[in-house]
Amino acid sequence: AVYLVSNISIIRIFIERVNDVYGLNTNNYYLIMMIIGIYLKPVIFIIETASNYISRRNEYEADYNAIKNGYGKELIKTFKDLSSDELVDVYPDQLVEILKFNHPGMYNRIKFILKKDKELNEKNNIG
């Protein structure tokens, strides 16, 4: 965006080409914004996917901190209570979760909590 603002000639050329393609005599800014939106869709998709990944990773980190503080079983109970109304997709397809969800699915979170809780218990029993 900063590059385009500092090089306004690129924007003018783009507007002229849009007007030529659609045979317009005046600028139709709605059409121009629609076309820009179409061009930006892949970039936005990549940014959203990366943002969702970071958010899911942070949720796992928060869950791990709760487990370390001894709240693993309470967290599982809370997740089960939240998913009891059937408005939550408890076990989404892995690809859908990666591309669209900014929180891990309930099944994956509970599985993670049980695994980390078991690891911490084994570590405490050994040490």
Image (tube, rainbow, N blue to C red):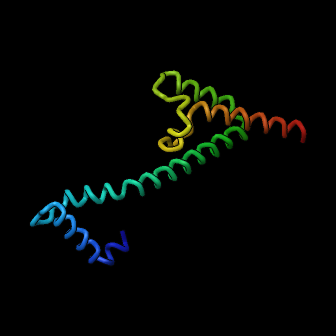
Q: Residue at x 73, y 41 (%)?
A: 68
Q: Nearer the viewer, residue 114 or 75?
A: 114
| Quadrant showing the N terminus | bottom left
Residue that protrudes farthest toward the right in the picture: 126
Q: Residue at x 31, y 55 (%)?
A: 38
**Left or right of residue 67: residue 89:** left
Pinpoint residue 49: horizontal percent, then vertical percent: 49, 50
Q: Nearer the viewer, residue 105 or 117?
A: 105
Image quadrant in which you'd find residue 12: bottom left
Pinpoint residue 39: horizontal percent, then vertical percent: 34, 58
**Left or right of residue 122: residue 116:** left
Pinpoint residue 117: horizontal percent, then vertical percent: 74, 35
Pinpoint residue 73: horizontal percent, then vertical percent: 68, 29
| Quadrant showing the C terminus | top right
Q: Nearer the viewer, residue 41 or 17?
A: 17
Image quadrant in which you'd find residue 30: bottom left
Q: Residue at x 37, y 74 (%)?
A: 3
Q: Residue at x 11, y 66 (%)?
A: 26
**Left or right of residue 40: residue 24:** left
Q: Is residue 86 above or below residue 97?
A: above
Count of numbered labels shown in the rendering: 0
Image quadrant in which you'd find residue 65: top right
**Left or right of residue 40: residue 99:** right
